[in-house]
Image (cartoon, rainbow, N blue to C red):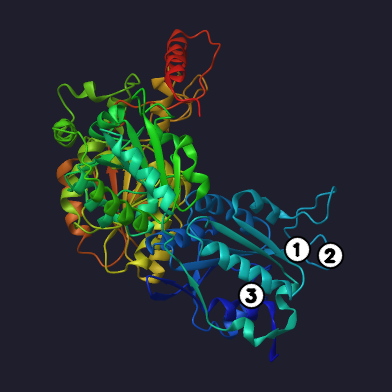
Amino acid sequence: MKCTKMTVGQAIVRFLDNQYVEMDGVQTKFVDGIFTIFGHGIVVGLGQALDENPRGLRVYQGRNEQGMAHVAAGYAKQKNRRKIIACASSIGPGAANMITAAADATVNNVPLLLFPGDTFATRQPDPVLQQIEQPSSLAVTTNDAFKPVCKYWDRIIRPEQLMSALINAMRVLTDPADTGAVCIALSQDVEGEAYEYPDEFFKKRVHRITRPRPVAEDLDALVSLIKNSKKPLVICGGGVRYSEAGEALEAFCKAFNIPFAETQSGKSACRSSHPMNLGGVGVTGNLSANMIAEKADLVLAVGSRLSDFTTGSKSQYKHAGVKYAAINLSKFHAYKLDAYPVVADAKAAIEDLTKALKKAGYRSAYSGEIEAAKAAWDKEMKKLSDYKYGKGFKTLIAAQRKGSVEDFVKVTGGTVTQTAALALVREEIPADAIIVGSSGSLPGDLQRMWTTDARDAYHMEYGYSCMGYEIAAALGAKMAEPKREVYAMCGDGSFLMLHSELITSLQEGMKINVLLFDNCGFGCINNLQMGNGIGSLATEFRYRDKKGKLDGDMMPIDYALVAKGYGCKTYTARTPEELRKALADAKKQKISTLIDIKVLPKTMTDGYRSWWNVGLAEVTGIKAEQAAYAKLIKARDAARRY
């Protein structure tokens, strides 16, 4: 067997450069490049190989290891998981910073390849710089912390181990049913060690993403379930998006008069304007979807993890005899809610199911309910879109902290509601623009209010709801689709958590638009806190008062000035008119922009006939908390047990 002597770092570069995926006969180069922040544990090993000959891999410079990994995850998601950017960090804090991003990718089934540096395999210079020493085991390093949050984990302590590690990494990264984060820890001395690698190992490899069709028995059982239902409801999950099954699902639902509702991951797989599309469902769902969900006698989940937000903590589907079925490539997810599991590709299964139901002559019994539900939500949408600060304004506030709105107006001058701002943004930005979000109250407002007929235009990470994902992933989405405008929807709390890759967007010449909704704190959690009778503790950005409590004046922060210092084009919007003007001008810019939107606190949407199970105090001396707990127990008793 012909071999070539090279280092571990050089072998990684050569291998990654020749990996391809194929779906529906179309081949795509799988690894675009490597994001890195060089430190002593990676720069002279893998870094040397990238400097000497990066081959076809592009090298990207990150600013924060978590941030750059979020960029890579956003890129992979926007590429429908058919292209990735690997990430490499040094030992210690650099590696630890990527753990959050690894968890985020695994929860959301997004491929993310990580190469953190590690300690010396020989242990001769121990303890090396940044090494954690565990007296119970010298084999334990920072990188062991990746194990619970990755779908595959390995550590290279000999050069020849790299071959099986990389093959298994590709196995997981290209598996649509079970992909997520992959960690291959690189002992820093071994990175530079050489080995006679077989040339055969570096041949072009094509990893095929296939479309498993449902077996005949499962298809027959699913057809029988639907035929016996009068008012079924389809849940459109992320699997519909990744399978590119949106058109097939639209045609299926129209043919049989079956409405469908969207999860956060499934939104924009189908057109918002489709007559059967009810919009978001569950805790962050809207009125129309949740109205229909309550009376559905069959719930067919297509490509969904069926999280607590989608199921209303297992209370959303209230029909006494409701049954569940699930189409999913993952057998694990297909079995949830005791559903009848159909393990198959979403598009293939919907196509086969359409043919079978047409033969059966099926049509649902809905007659006007879908239209009535959509009309009710349209009326509510108009109210949310038109709402202005002024007379009657406080009726919109779910949990009013005394003086908070007035305090905010006094400090910032902001007079625009969050819901009205979102409606205005939808009017002003391009119809095919990509919006990126993740945390706070914005995902709820967006799942309810945002509409788009552009495929894959709604890029929401809500499986992990990771603060700091928004701006980084917006850059990843822009790198994936550079011709489309990309908008990061983030709160002030999330911006403060992580926005370092905004600088990377400037370096790469990749324009992104940051829409920063400043409500002086963690508004979503403040609502949850106060809505359950708890005081406003450490969820608003306030100075300490004379009594030593975090209950003083609100803190005025000029976020536009921060981004301006980086080199972005920035704006501050305190009124709807200022926001409209800023959005119009931002579209003309060639560099990244940031609009600091001073939105009024507590002007997000509320729940619409849904419920979320949280752990309230069973014993408390506060009457408001006692009432909230009593309400919680009543709701828990009504929820499904498993």
Compared with 258, 118 (above or below) is: below
Q: Which residue is mark 3?
A: 46
Give residue 616's position: percent from left, percent from top. Answer: 51, 20
Give residue 317's position: percent from left, percent from top. Answer: 35, 29
In the image shown, does 510 or 275 lie closer to the viewer?
Answer: 275
Compared across the picture, whether 170 is left or right of 502 comes to right
- Verify CB contact (< 8 Å) between mark 2 and mark 1: yes
Q: CA distance from mark 1 to mark 3?
A: 14 Å
- Determine the residue positioned at 58% across, 78% down: 15
Answer yes or no: is residue 491 visible.
no
For the residue marked with disc 1, what is the amino acid? Thr
Q: CA distance from mark 2 to mark 1?
A: 7 Å
Q: Which residue is mark 2?
A: 123
Using the rendered view, name the quadrant where residue 200 is placed.
Answer: bottom right
For the residue marked with disc 3, what is the amino acid? Leu
Give residue 356's position: percent from left, percent from top. Answer: 29, 51
Secondary structure beneath dot 1 equals loop
Answer yes or no: is residue 547 visible.
yes
Compared across the picture, whether 347 is left or right of 50 comes to left
Compared with 424, 564 (above or below) is: below
- Determine the residue positioned at 30% across, 27% down: 294
Give residue 239's position: percent from left, percent from top. Answer: 39, 53
Disc with the residue nearer the chain's start (2 vs 3)? 3
Q: Which residue is mark 1?
A: 119
- Determine the residue positioned at 41% across, 56% down: 345
| Residue found at the very far bottom of the displayed protein | 2
Using the rendered view, name the quadrant where residue 312 is placed.
Answer: top left
